Amino acid sequence: MAADPDATMTAAATMHHGGPDATEIRHDWPMPFAGPGELLVRITAAALNNTDIWSREGAYGSPEDPTAIAGWKGVPLEFPRIQGIDVAGVVEAVGDSVPSHWIGRRVLVDPTVRYAGEFPVDLIGTEADGGFAEFHVCALSRAHDVSDSPLTDAQLACLPTAYGTAMGMINRAGCSPGERVLVTGSSGGVGSAAIQLLSDRGCHVVARTSPDKAADVERWGAHEVSVRGADELGQLAEVDAAVDVVGGEEFPALVDRLRDGGRLVFAGAIAGPMVTLDLRRVYLRQRRLIGSTMHTPQDFAELARVATEGGVRPHVAEVFALEDLHTAQERFARRDFFGKLVVAPNGTDAALSSGWTPTVTRC
Ligand SMILES: NC(=O)c1ccc[n+]([C@@H]2O[C@H](COP(=O)([O-])OP(=O)(O)OC[C@H]3O[C@@H](n4cnc5c(N)ncnc54)[C@H](OP(=O)(O)O)[C@@H]3O)[C@@H](O)[C@H]2O)c1
C-alpha cells in the first residue's frame, strides 16, 4: 500500500525552547513514512526523562556560557521537534529493501540516530523526532526485535536511556560474573537499572542508597545495602568495581573502596561535579577511573537480548495518554513516584500488552 502524503497523526510538537506551553498537542501533524531501509513504527509507549524537560527549556548551557539557552550539544535545538527519547512500538510498515517479515514485530528503538565510532552524537527527541507521537520512522539498524520479551511495551520503553546508560557503564568497567560491584544513586533510574543488569549478569551487588529506599533496592536485586548518612563507605569490604552517578563529596571514598586494580565507572554527578581527589589513591593501587555516556550499538543489542530473556523488570509508575503529556510532565517534576512515567500514543491497552495488529503493509 502506498504512503498517503496527506495523512496526519497526533503528536506533541515542541515549537521553541521554553516552558510546558512550548509543546503543543497537535492532531494535524504530518505522518512520517518509511523510506528505503526504514521502518514505520506505531509507538505503543514512550517513557519520560529529565532530558525531555531540560532540552525543551534549553537548560544545558554552552561551554562558553553556562546560562545560554541550549540543548545537550551546547547549541539551541532546531524546531519544531517531537521529543521523547525512549520508544517502544510495533512495526506498521516497511520501506524498500526491508524484509516484510518485520511487519507486526515489537521493537525497541535505539535512540541514537548517528554514532561517531561507538559514541552517540545525534539522538531522537533532540536532533531527530522522537516518541511523543503516534508514529516514528527509524532505520532498520536501530530497531531491535523484542517480540518475545515477557515485558509489556510500557516496560520496554523504560529501557533505552536508563538501562542503556547502565549497560554502557557495566560493559566499560568490564563487570563479570562473581564480581563484587558497588552501585550509587541506586534507587534512581540509572542506578536501579544497574542493580538489575549486574544481578542478571551474576555479580554480587552492593547498593548505596538513602535510608527510606533500602527495601526498594533489595527488591531490585541488591545483595547488600549500604545506607547513605548511616553507614560509612569505609566500613564496606572492598569491591572489584563501582558504578557511580552521584559524584560529589563521597567520590574519593568510593575510589578507596576499590581493590587493587579495581575500576570506577561514572556517568553522572547528581551530588556535585567538583571533587577533590588524592591521585596517589588511584595510581599507587593500579585503580582505573572510567567516564561513560550512554551506550554503544553493541551495548544496546545486549540490552535488547536481556529484555527478551526477561533479565530485567522495569517498574512503571503510571501510564498516561499522549494528550495528557503535560499532566505527566507535571507529575515527573513533582518526583512523587517510584519507577518510570510512560505516555501511550496509541492507548494504554497497547502500552500494557505485548501485541499489536498491523493495518498497513509497505510504503
Ligand atoms: N552520562 C549519561 O549518559 C547519563 C545518562 C542518564 C543519566 N545521567 C546522569 O546520571 C545521574 C542520575 O540520573 P538518574 O536518571 O538515575 O537520576 P534519578 O532517577 O533522579 O536518580 C538519582 C539518584 O541519585 C541519588 N541522589 C540524588 N541526590 C543525591 C545527592 N545529593 N547525593 C547522593 N545521592 C543522591 C538518589 O538515589 P539514592 O537515594 O538511592 O541514593 C536518586 O534516586 C544524573 O546526574 C543524570 O544527569 C547520565
Image (cartoon, rainbow, N blue to C red):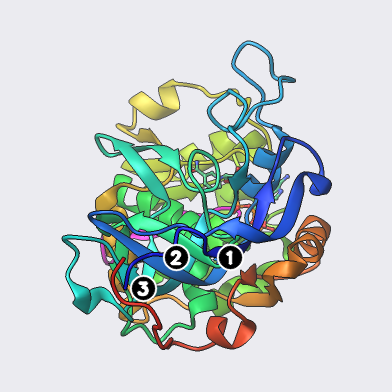
Residue occupying image coordinates x 31% and y 45%: 172
Q: Which residue is mark 2?
A: 205
Comparing 167 with 241, the one in front is: 167
Comparing 151 with 310, the one in front is: 151
How far apart are the alpha carbons under marks 3 and 1?
16 Å
The amino acid type, in three-letter code, at marker 2 is Val
Mark 2 C-beta closer than 8 Å to ligand 1: no
Q: Position of residue 64 (x, y in %)?
A: 62, 10
Indicate the quadrant containing the N terminus: top left, top right, bottom left or bottom right: bottom left
Dot 3: what SS? Answer: strand
Give the class, few, some or many, for how many residues have Cα within 10 Å of label 1's Cα (few <14, many ≥20).
Answer: some
Dot 2: what SS? Answer: strand
Q: Position of residue 322 (x, y in %)?
A: 68, 68
Specify start and end residues of the magenta stretch as a single range. 176-185
Mark 1 C-beta closer than 8 Å to ligand 1: no
Is the residue 194 above or below the residue 346 in the image?
Answer: above
Q: Which residue is mark 1?
A: 9
* Quadrant assignment, res 347: bottom right
Asked whether the viewer can see residue 237, the reply is: no
Q: Which residue is mark 3?
A: 91
Comparing 205 with 77, the one in front is: 77
Indicate the quadrant containing the C terminus: top left, top right, bottom left or bottom right: bottom left
Direction from residue 174 to residue 194 in the image, left or right: right
Q: Residue at the top extreme?
A: 64
Q: Position of residue 94 (x, y in %)?
A: 28, 67
